[in-house]
């Protein structure tokens, strides 16, 4: 009887420890989700939403590279298939994902932000109908220049020797440039128009004061 109780106690402890272990979900966009997988049915992997207790998050198979279970098992959802546009091998795709992840963490694009702010400021301060063409034209071109990968943003220096890593890094970096450019250009345009209308108001107030004095 004591042996049975002891075995039940060990089983209970093992079950409790497993329930606390978390799995690692690697998404195709480079993001990682560390939560325990609830189920893998109906074309999606489901986990509990850490921000909304009682609700689930669902990741469709197309969004997934692989799931690394706490037990040590790896379940891959990505495979090379040129018919579906999956040109990379599984190993190459992993480098691509790592490039996306490093760019998302380290690429800040301050040049795109302040450059677009400057041209937006000029466009707005001109007070013309065509003022917005400057910042949004800048936005259209900001993704063209080559992305400079700083070594301080690379999680492993050996990754830079792999072309898929560079392509993944560049994809996220160019997207971040466009986002920063949109934010900076819109802010600069607003400030520029504010300066223009403030100057215009001051001019009319000065003109009215001059007329009343005469």
Image (tube, helix red, strand yellow):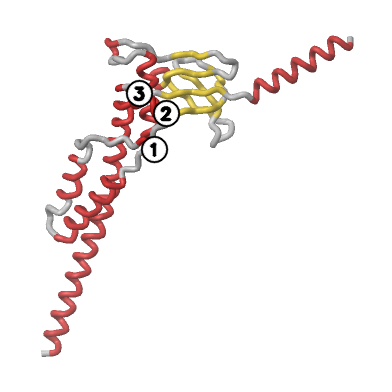
How many angstroms separate mark 2 from mark 1 (CA)? 10 Å
Q: Is residue 7 left or right of residue 15?
A: right
Q: What residue is at 18 percent from the left and 40 percent from the top?
A: 141
Disc sitting over residue 96 in the figure: 3
From the top left corner, tell me how far across and down residue 117 is, in percent.
Answer: 25, 53
Between label 3 and label 2, give the one nearer the viewer. 2
Query: Between residues 150 and 110, which one lies in front from this camera angle?
Result: 150
Measured as percent of width and height from the top left, residue 158 is found at 38, 25
Label 2 SS: loop
Q: For the residue labelled by badge 1, is the local secondary structure a helix, a strand or a loop? A: helix
**Does residue 29 appear to the left or right of 193 in the view shown?**
right
Residue pointed to by mark 1:
152
166 relative to 75, above or below = below
Q: Residues within 10 Å of mark 2 (few under 14, many from 20)?
A: few
Count of numbered circles in the view: 3
Whichever of callouts 3 and 1 sits on the residue coming sooner in the sequence is: 3
Mark 3 vs mark 1, foreground winner is 1
- 134 shown above or below 71: below
Q: Earlier in the sequence, mark 3 or mark 2?
A: 3
Image quadrant containing the N terminus = top right
Q: Residue furthest bottom?
A: 214
* Pointer 3 with pointer 1, Cβ within 8 A: no
**Secondary structure of the residue carrying numbered label 3:** helix
Q: Residues within 10 Å of mark 1 (few under 14, many from 20)?
A: few
Q: Position of residue 170 (x, y in %)?
A: 29, 31
Q: Residue at x 42, y 19 (%)?
A: 65
User: Which mark is drawn over residue 92?
Assistant: none
Q: CB atoms at circles 2 and 1 under 8 Å apart? A: no
Residue at mark 2: 156
């Amino acid at each position: 009887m004591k042996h049975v109780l002891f075995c039940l106690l060990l089983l209970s402890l093992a079950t409790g420890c497993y329930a606390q272990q978390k799995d690692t979900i690697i998404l195709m966009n480079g993001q990682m989700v560390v939560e325990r997988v609830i189920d893998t049915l109906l074309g999606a992997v489901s986990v509990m939403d850490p921000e909304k207790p009682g609700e689930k998050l669902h990741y469709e198979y197309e969004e997934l590279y692989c799931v690394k279970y706490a037990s040590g098992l790896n379940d891959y959802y990505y495979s090379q298939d040129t018919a579906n546009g999956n040109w990379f091998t599984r190993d190459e795709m992993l480098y691509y994902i790592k490039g996306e992840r490093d760019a998302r963490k380290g690429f800040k694009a301050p040049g795109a932000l302040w450059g677009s702010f400057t041209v937006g400021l000029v466009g707005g301060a001109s007070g013309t109908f065509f003022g917005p063409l400057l910042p949004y034209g800048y936005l259209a071109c900001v993704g063209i220049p080559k992305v400079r990968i700083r070594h301080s943003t690379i999680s492993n220096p050996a990754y830079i020797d792999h072309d898929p890593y560079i392509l993944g890094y560049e994809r996220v970096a160019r997207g971040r440039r466009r986002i920063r450019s949109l934010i900076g250009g819109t802010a600069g345009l607003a400030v520029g128009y504010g300066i223009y209308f403030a100057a215009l108001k001051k001019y009319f107030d000065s003109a009215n004061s001059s007329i009343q004095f005469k």
